[in-house]
Amino acid sequence: MARLKLLALNDSDFQHKDVAFMTRDERYSNAIRKAVLITRKSKEHGLTDMEEKHWYSVAATKQDTNGFALHTSMFHPTLSGQCDEEQKNYWLPLSENFQIIGTYAQTELGH
């Protein structure tokens, strides 16, 4: 994980002014810009494991909004754990390559 953190933190494409001094529109635009970069750069760096992609994304966004946090930490693992083999063969490649972006919701009363 340290390698992924350094890879992201040292990447000049992820540098910007402090989000505390950005307008709402600037924060939104910055988050979208970083989400696109994270997707592209995770492919360039050969990150194939969803956990690697998740930690790279976390390091790249630091205190920013991380548009992929629920996708990589909840949605993809849920597909992995609850799909049958036919469903996994269809859905996991789409999720891994960010061709679909998902979230996660719990419907039990305590959540």
Image (tube, helix red, strand yellow):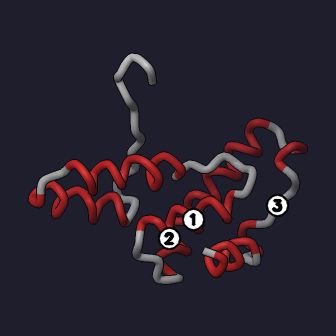
Where, quadrant-wise, is the N terminus in this rendering? Answer: bottom right
Q: Are marks 1 and 3 in contact (CB under 8 Å)?
A: no
Q: Position of residue 62 (x, y in %)?
A: 72, 57
Q: Position of residue 52 (x, y in %)?
A: 50, 70
Q: Nearer the viewer, mark 2 or mark 3?
A: 2
Residue at the limit of the structure toward the front, as seen here = 110
Helix, strand or loop at label 3? It is loop
Between the C-alphas of marks 1 and 3, the distance is 20 Å
The amino acid type of the residue labelled 2 equals Glu
- Image check: 91 left or right of 29? left
The amino acid type of the residue labelled 3 equals His
Q: Position of residue 41 (x, y in %)?
A: 55, 74
Disc 1 crowd, CA 10 A, few/some/many (<14, 14-19, 20+): some
Tell me the residue that label 3 is attached to.
16
Tell me the residue that label 2 is attached to.
52
Vertical placement of residue 42 versus 104, above or below: below
Give the residue displayed 34% in from the left and 58% down from the top.
95
Q: Which label was assigned to residue 94?
A: none
Tell me the residue that label 1 is attached to.
55
Helix, strand or loop at label 2? It is helix
Please identify the quarter of the rendering in which residue 111 is found.
top left
Q: Earlier in the sequence, mark 1 or mark 3?
A: 3
Q: Are marks 1 and 2 in contact (CB under 8 Å)?
A: yes
- Image check: 91 left or right of 40? left
Looking at the rendered structure, the number of numbered marks drawn on it comes to 3
Give the residue displayed 41% in from the left and 72% down from the top.
49
Q: Nearer the viewer, residue 90 or 110?
A: 110
Give the residue displayed 40% in from the left and 60% down from the top.
98
Give the residue displayed 22% in from the left and 48% down from the top.
82
